[in-house]
Image (cartoon, rainbow, N blue to C red):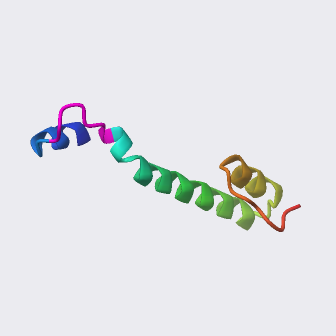
Amino acid sequence: SLQRESQRLGMAPGFDFCRANYPLRREFATLMISLEAGAQMQQGDSEKPALLLRSAGFQVAGFD
């Protein structure tokens, strides 16, 4: 686990490994949302992808 690895490497006590990993988790979430929206567009649905992307904070042009 990440916690064991941080201890093995001698990270400072209280090192927040979850917070340190936040940028990577955010990128992964963005990728998953983008892939899901693309899959819905391929199925011919033009409303759901825009709603999905907007709910994730994306600005969507061309769907209004």
Q: Pick whichever, 10 or 63, lies toward us.
A: 10
Q: Is residue 17 above or below residue 28?
A: above
Residue 1 can be seen, yes or no: no
Foreground residue among 14 and 30 = 14
Q: Is residue 35 left or right of residue 49?
A: left
Quarter the N terminus occupies: top left
Magenta stretch contains residue 12: yes
Magenta residues, start to end: 11-17
Residue 57 inside the magenta-drawn segment: no
Would you say the magenta stretch is mainly helix, strand or loop?
A: loop
Camera-nearest residue between 33 and 7: 7
User: Is 20 on the left or on the right of 37, as rendered?
Assistant: left
Instruction: Please give the name of the residue rendered at 48% of the width and 56% of the height, measured from the top-left corner.
Output: 27
Tell me if 34 is positioned left or right of 47 in this view: left
Q: Position of residue 36 (x, y in %)?
A: 63, 56
- The furthest residue to the right: 64
Whether residue 63 can be seen here: yes
